[in-house]
Image (cartoon, rainbow, N blue to C red):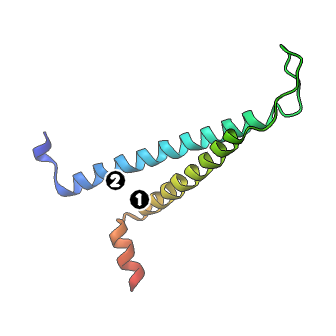
Amino acid sequence: MCVFLSLTRHRFLLLAAVYNFLQYSSTYTLFVWLTLLIAQTLPLGTFSPSTGRPYPGVDGQQVAIIVLAFLFWLFTGALFASHTRLVLRNMTTIEEIGMNRT
């Protein structure tokens, strides 16, 4: 079956795989970032119903994970937006670079 794939079909399959990966990874990193952000900010200043003690506060590791999740989302989201623009214009990266030079 792979013998019948032409160069243009292979290019399409490769672009579709990269595009789907960027779509799902940017969605997942956005979900992780929002979930961590909400989980960190919601219980501040509240009491735990089981122990009656206040919430322990901000953890440095959680803040670092929130920042990293945001940076990963920013990177994958920018790549996804760039690939979306290329797909809508029906161009490759090399073709776009060639157009921008002239």
Q: Are marks 2 and 1 in contact (CB under 8 Å)?
A: yes
Instruction: Give the percent coordinates (x, y) of residue 99.
Output: 38, 79
Report whether 45 appears left or right of 82. right
Instruction: Give the percent coordinates (x, y) of residue 55.
Output: 84, 28
Q: Nearer the viewer, residue 69 or 60?
A: 60
Instruction: Give the percent coordinates (x, y) of residue 93.
Output: 37, 67
Residue at 53% across, 58% down: 78
Residue at 42% across, 80% down: 100
Q: Nearer the viewer, residue 98 or 34?
A: 34
Q: Nearer the viewer, residue 32 or 91?
A: 32
In the figure, 14 relative to 32: above or below? below
Mark 2 vs mark 1, CA separation in Å:
9 Å
Say which of marks 2 and 1 sits in front.
2
> Label 2's element?
helix
Q: Callout 1, which amino acid? A: Val
Quarter where residue 95 is shown: bottom left
Mark 2 highlights which residue?
15
The quadrant of the rendering that contains the C terminus is bottom left
In the figure, 67 relative to 43: above or below? below
Q: Earlier in the sequence, mark 2 or mark 1?
A: 2
Q: Callout 2, which amino acid? A: Leu
Label 2: few (<14), some or many (≥20) within 10 Å?
A: some
Mark 1 highlights which residue?
87
Instruction: Give the percent coordinates (x, y) of residue 64.
Output: 65, 45
Which residue lies most toward the left here? Answer: 3
Residue at 48% across, 57% down: 79
The quadrant of the rendering that contains the N terminus is top left
Label 1: few (<14), some or many (≥20) within 10 Å?
A: some
Report whether 44 appears left or right of 36. right
